[in-house]
Structure formats: C-alpha cells, structure tokens
Amino acid sequence: MRPDKEKVVDEVWDDARIDEFLSKSPLGPGEDPDYSAVLYAYRSMRAEDFERFISRFKAQDRNVHAVGRDGKTVSEVIAAHAGAEPFLRALS
C-alpha cells in the first residue's frame, strides 16, 4: 500500500453501495460489462459483501461467467489468489 494511503477497515457496504457496482462502466473499450462489474466488485468488496452483490447481479439475469478480453472468466482470473475461495463459492 502506498505510504500516503490510509488503510480503511470496517467499511459499511449497505445495499445502495453494493448496487452502485451493478452499473459500473466497463473496464475498457470492448470489455464485457458483466465481466467488468464482477471484477470491480471482487477487487473492492469483502467476501460477504461480494456474495450479496452476486445475488443481486444474478437476480438481474447477468452473466457471472462472462469472459474478459483475455478469454478468461473472473473465476479463472482469481483462482490462484490467496483467499479467493469464498469469492469462488459465490460465483459458482
């Protein structure tokens, strides 16, 4: 972490804040919006908040298995990350 950036703990992730991630802009030109939204949420949320996000995401009939420009799903991208297991369970 950068020395000038303070670590934030115990953030409040209410429904409104989680819902903001449902309408995030794609990561870049040509990137699947569903892939981008899931990756943004993974990078930003704790596992329990991510699980709530995925539930809302699926309720909108969105694709948790969308692929990025590299041809991988978010599950494939994060599979080797330490601590990814609860996120992978939410995506299954």
Image: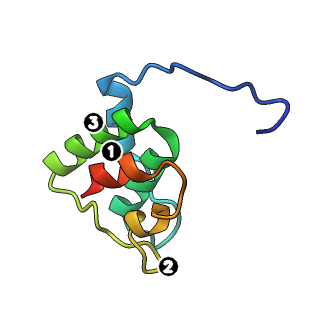
- The amino acid sitting under disc 2 is Asp
Q: Are marks 3 and 2 in contact (CB under 8 Å)?
A: no
Q: Quadrant of residue 71?
A: bottom left
Q: Earlier in the sequence, mark 2 or mark 1?
A: 1
CA gap, disc 2 and disc 1: 22 Å
Judging from the image, what secondary structure is the residue with disc 1 in?
helix
- The amino acid sitting under disc 1 is Leu
- 84, above or below 47, in the image: below
1 with respect to 71 (left or right): right
- For the question of whether residue 37 can be seen, the reply is no
Q: Quadrant of the C terminus?
A: bottom left
Q: Quadrant of residue 32?
A: bottom left
- 40, above or below 28, in the image: above
- The amino acid sitting under disc 3 is Arg
| Residue matched to label 1 | 22
Specify the farthest residue to the bottom. Answer: 71
Judging from the image, what secondary structure is the residue with disc 2 in?
loop
Judging from the image, what secondary structure is the residue with disc 3 in?
helix
Q: Earlier in the sequence, mark 3 or mark 1?
A: 1
Q: Earlier in the sequence, mark 3 or mark 2?
A: 3
Which is more foreground, mark 3 or mark 1? 3
39 with respect to 81 (left or right): left
Q: Position of residue 10 (x, y in %)?
A: 51, 19
Q: Are marks 2 and 1 in contact (CB under 8 Å)?
A: no
Residue drawn where x is 39% and y is 42% of the image? 21
Q: Which mark is residue 85?
A: none
| Residue matched to label 3 | 52
29 with respect to 5 (left or right): left
- For the question of whether residue 26 can be seen, the reply is yes
CA gap, disc 3 and disc 2: 27 Å
Q: Which mark is residue 70?
A: 2
CA gap, disc 3 and disc 1: 12 Å
